[in-house]
């Protein structure tokens, strides 16, 4: 779980960009360059292989950047733990920070190929991306065109994503409360995911009309109103304390609810 910290913003008047040539698109958010580097697009989270919209996202990124010269900008972090370079990608040497033309990361989100993944301290374009994901959710891009017949049935009553004290030791104080406003729904095979691809799969569970169901991140025995992630992890905490996304999908992997905070 990511602890709260002071957000740092890059307030330079112009972007500092460096060129690279893409030799391979790995998937919808990762590419390889002629400098033998792997780049991970900041703020972009596309489906993994086997998931809905994986191929569409990869094909769109290939169309945009493969075998082309791109321009790269870094934020506070240079690379992730894998290690991959973390970069904003532009199609031209666009140094004006108020101009988002050719901003590939933003295009992937706005066109509905990617969900939003923001992790501090890389927050330079936070507001721009938040507006883009809100706009995208109203459109019929790949991720948003696959809405479930149950889309709109669920709302979040409470999202307690910051547990009291140590998150790892108090994971059951990390929970989300969902209210079903439709008829009774059999949720067998439904899933809840976060940005880090932790997945909770519902087993035999029925969301009653008008009822509130609580999903705790820790361990326990499920009942008619309370569910437990019961993940076999050293630290069972799921939700980041500052920025994360919740995706609720039905048994056919169609989107029922997305919540970003």
Image: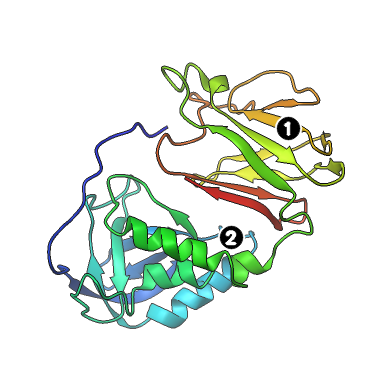
Residue 49 located left or right of residue 186: left
Q: Which residue appears farthest toward the left when viewing the image?
A: 13
Instruction: Report which residue position mark 1 lands on.
Output: 212
Q: Nearer the viewer, residue 142 or 183?
A: 183
Residue 8 located left or right of residue 42: left
Residue 65 place in picture, x, y as percent:
38, 79
Q: Residue at x 79, y 59 (%)?
A: 149
Residue 204 located left or right of residue 155: right
The answer to whether residue 135 of the structure is visible from this angle is yes
Quadrant of the image containing the N terminus: top left
Callout in the foreground (1, 2)? 1
Above or below, 198 relative to 137: above
Mark 2 burial class by Cα count in 10 Å: few <14, some 14-19, many 20+: few
Q: Earlier in the sequence, mark 1 or mark 2?
A: 2
Above or below, 60 relative to 124: below
Residue 162 place in picture, x, y as percent:
46, 28
Instruction: Report which residue position mark 2 lands on.
Output: 49
Above or below, 97 relative to 239: below
Mark 1 burial class by Cα count in 10 Å: few <14, some 14-19, many 20+: many
Q: Residue at x 42, y 58 (%)?
A: 130
């Amino acid at each position: 779980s990511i602890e709260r910290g002071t957000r740092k913003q890059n307030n330079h008047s112009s972007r500092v960009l460096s060129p690279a040539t893409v030799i391979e698109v790995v998937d919808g958010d990762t590419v390889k360059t002629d400098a033998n580097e792997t780049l991970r697009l900041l703020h972009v989270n596309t489906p993994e292989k086997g998931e809905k919209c994986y191929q569409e996202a990869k094909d769109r990124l290939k169309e945009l950047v493969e075998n082309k010269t791109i321009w790269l900008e870094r934020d506070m972090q240079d690379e992730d733990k894998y290690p991959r370079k973390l970069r904003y990608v532009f199609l031209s040497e666009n140094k004006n920070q108020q101009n988002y033309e050719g901003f590939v990361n933003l295009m992937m989100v706005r066109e509905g190929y990617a969900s939003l993944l923001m992790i501090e301290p890389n927050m330079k374009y936070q507001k721009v991306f938040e507006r883009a994901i809100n706009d995208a959710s109203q459109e019929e891009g790949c991720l948003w065109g696959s809405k479930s017949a149950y889309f709109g049935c669920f709302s979040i009553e409470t999202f307690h994503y910051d547990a009291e004290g140590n998150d790892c030791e108090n994971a059951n104080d990390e929970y989300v409360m969902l209210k079903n406003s439709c008829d009774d729904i059999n949720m067998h095979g439904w899933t809840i995911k976060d940005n880090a691809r932790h997945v909770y799969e519902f087993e035999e569970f029925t969301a009653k009309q008008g009822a509130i169901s609580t999903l705790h991140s820790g361990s326990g025995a499920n009942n008619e109103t309370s569910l437990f992630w019961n993940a076999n992890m050293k630290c069972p905490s799921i939700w980041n304390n500052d920025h994360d996304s919740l995706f609720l999908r039905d048994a056919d992997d169609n989107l029922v609810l997305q919540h970003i905070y």
